[in-house]
């Protein structure tokens, strides 16, 4: 997936030109880069919540129904909405 602001466009799951197609099932890694071109720590919780979840759903469809197994973000801090969402998906106890 594209990096920087290009990787944060709602409804889009851009792919780097040098990468294989997202729906290439011969590759096991589905990597999503989700961070701004210029880091803004004060917006990271907002960026890494609903917007990130929406991109993950978009990219799941673009990657032949394969959920991202690696997500790169700036200023990782567990935001309540993201933590709740992840716990519901993976049923962490």
Image (cartoon, rainbow, N blue to C red):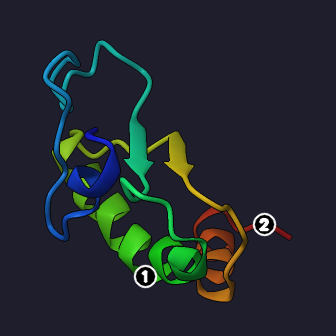
Q: Residue extending furthest front?
A: 38
Q: Which mark is drawn over residue 92?
A: 2
Q: Position of residue 79 (x, y in %)?
A: 67, 81
Quadrant location, the C terminus: bottom right
Q: Give the answer, above or below, for where 64 lies relative to 49.
A: above
Q: Position of residue 64 (x, y in %)?
A: 21, 39
Q: Position of residue 11 (x, y in %)?
A: 14, 67
Looking at the image, is mark 1 or mark 2 nearer the viewer?
A: 1
Q: Relative to residue 20, is residue 33 drawn left or right?
A: right
Please name whichever residue, 42 or 64, is drawn nearer the observer in this view of the structure: 42
Q: Relative to residue 83, is residue 44 drawn left or right?
A: left
Which of pointers 1 and 2 lies earlier in the amino acid sequence?
1
Q: Which mark is drawn over residue 50?
A: 1
Label 2 secondary element: loop
Would you call the spot at circle 2 few (<14 residues within 10 Å), some (14-19), or many (20 or more)?
A: few
Quadrant location, the N terminus: top left
Would you call the spot at circle 1 few (<14 residues within 10 Å), some (14-19), or many (20 or more)?
A: some
Say which quarter of the image contains residue 53.
Answer: bottom left
Q: Relative to residue 70, is residue 11 drawn left or right?
A: left
Please name whichever residue, 33 or 74, is drawn nearer the observer in this view of the structure: 74
Q: Relative to residue 50, is residue 91 drawn left or right?
A: right
Label 1 secondary element: helix
Say which quarter of the image contains residue 2.
Answer: top left
Q: Which mark is drawn over residue 33?
A: none
**Residue under the image location 43 percent in, 56 percent down:** 35
Please name whichever residue, 10 or 66, is drawn nearer the observer in this view of the structure: 10
Asked if the residue under mark 2 is in contact with the one under mark 1, i.e. CB atoms within 8 Å, the reply is no
**Residue under the image location 53 percent in, 46 percent down:** 72
**Residue under the image location 51 percent in, 47 percent down:** 71
Q: Position of residue 46 (x, y in %)?
A: 50, 83
How far apart marks 1 and 2 lie (CA) works out to: 20 Å
Q: Give the answer, above or below, for where 44 lies relative to 1.
A: below
């Amino acid at each position: 997936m594209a990096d920087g602001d290009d990787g944060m466009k709602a409804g889009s799951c851009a792919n780097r030109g040098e990468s294989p197609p997202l729906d290439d099932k011969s590759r096991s890694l589905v990597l999503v880069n989700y961070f701004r071109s210029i880091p803004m720590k004060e917006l990271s919780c907002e960026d890494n919540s609903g917007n990130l979840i929406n991109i993950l759903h978009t990219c799941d469809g673009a990657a032949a129904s394969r959920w991202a197994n690696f997500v790169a973000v700036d200023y990782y801090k567990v935001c309540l909405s993201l933590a709740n969402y992840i716990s519901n998906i993976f049923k962490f106890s």
